[in-house]
Amino acid sequence: MNAHADYATRLLAWFDVHGRHDLPWQHPRTPYRVWLSEIMLQQTQVRVVIPYFERFVAALPDVQALASAPQDTVLALWSGLGYYARARNLHAAAQRCVDMHGGDLPRDPVALLELPGIGRSTAGAILSQAWGDPFAILDGNVKRVLARRHAVEGWPGQPKVETRLWAIAEGLLPANRLADYTQAQMDFGATLCTRHNPACLLCPVNADCAAFLQGRVDELPTPRPAKALPEREASVLLLEDGQGRVLLEKRPPTGVWASLWSLPQAADEAQALDWLAAQSPGIVDPVDVDSPSRLQPVQHGFTHFRLRLQPLHWSGLAARHHVRDNDRLRWVARDELATLGIPAPIRTLLLAPRVAQED
DNA sequence: AATTCGGGGTA
DNA sequence: TACCCAGAATT
């Protein structure tokens, strides 16, 4: 038995006893459900995904249903998961499957990779799990496991390091049980070969792990180089009418929170008031723009910057309802909030606004 | 090659 | 806090 077969064999034996066999996308394990789960799981932990997955497949159970759904429905089902480009790409890919692949996800790896939102690792995960085809994955789990097993130096996000890890992953592929092998790697990385305090003494492959043998498990993989986060500020308008409806604005199709519904936003308070003065004839009866109340600022962290939003609140306004649904501006009742894609911090603000604390 | 996309869990 | 997580698309 060579070392490669030995690795896969040992991992699969571990998986049969200790792996996760009751995840919702495993029963039934259809291509559509595997695809949806893999997209949701990009940069997102299993525990977080599960309720979103259940809700999504219940509402849109197959490719056809997804392809024909309105974008707002798809984004509403995604609301809170983050990385909303995933939802827009998933939606567009489903429509392309209907147009070009008979309503099914293609099994051809080239066609699969051409679909938006599916890169090399996700394609490998889908091909191996949906059909048992021999393709490797290289997600965060596998990068960590292989960086340790082969003592690969350097941050795995670095192209040179990633190329090396791909080559190792391809070389370790077994001849069969590909679906289980893919799942085994992810379970192994998520539950045993974890970033902190990995259970090396219980590890089925520790005899071949360079990091373990060298006592360097805590050093590998090399962490991402630290970078200071810039801070941005903005003001948002929370306009409420007498019935508790709020005015929402659909964000542009690119950039942060693309195509989601949020509060009208301006660079600062003065520009927010200017915007209101300019827009008010169309959306409300003239209001006293000098008297908003300041709510508690919303602090929100992104990957690459920190955002501080200062909400300016008016209530009891007289809404003008010739604002059409097709427009970017829309008065939305509290009951309707669940049907729209809304950024998590904005949803929190709408459901539980807090007055600014004196300090 | 570097940057841009959220949100939640965790030490 | 800071970092990480079933990454991909864009520039």
Image: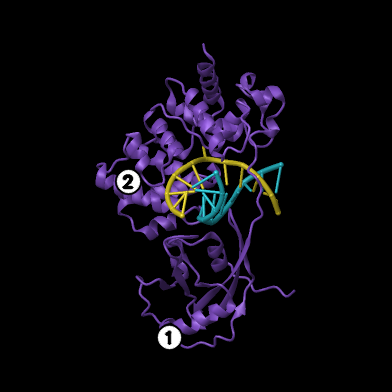
Chain colours: A purple, B cyan, C yellow
Nearer-N-terminus badge (2/1): 2
Q: Residue at x 58, y 67 (%)?
A: A352
Spot occupied by residue A98 in the image (x, y as percentages of width and height): 27, 46
Q: Can residue A260 be spotted in the picture? A: yes
Q: Residue at x 25, y 47 (%)?
A: A99
On screen, A283 above or below A207? below
Task: Nearest to the eye among marks 2 and 1: give it.
Answer: 1
Left or right of residue A30, residue A276 in this image: right
Front-most of A109 and A227? A227
In the rendered image, which residue does mark 2 sit on? Answer: A63
* Quadrant location of the C terminus of chain A in the rendered image: bottom right
Residues packed near mark 1 inside 10 Å, few (<14), some (14 to 19) or many (20 plus): few
Front-most of A352 and A279? A279
Spot occupied by residue C5 in the image (x, y as percentages of width and height): 57, 41
Q: Which chain is home to disc 1?
A: A
In the rendered image, which residue does mark 1 sit on? Answer: A281
Front-most of A203 and A236? A236
3D distance between C-alphas at marks 2 and 1: 44 Å
Q: Secondary structure at mark 1?
A: helix
Q: Residue furthest right?
A: A359
On screen, A148 above or below A233? above
Spot occupied by residue A356 in the image (x, y as percentages of width and height): 66, 73
The amino acid type of the residue labelled 2 equals Val
Q: Residue at x 41, y 73 (%)?
A: A330
Dot 2 and dot 1 within a common chain: yes
Q: Secondary structure at mark 2?
A: helix
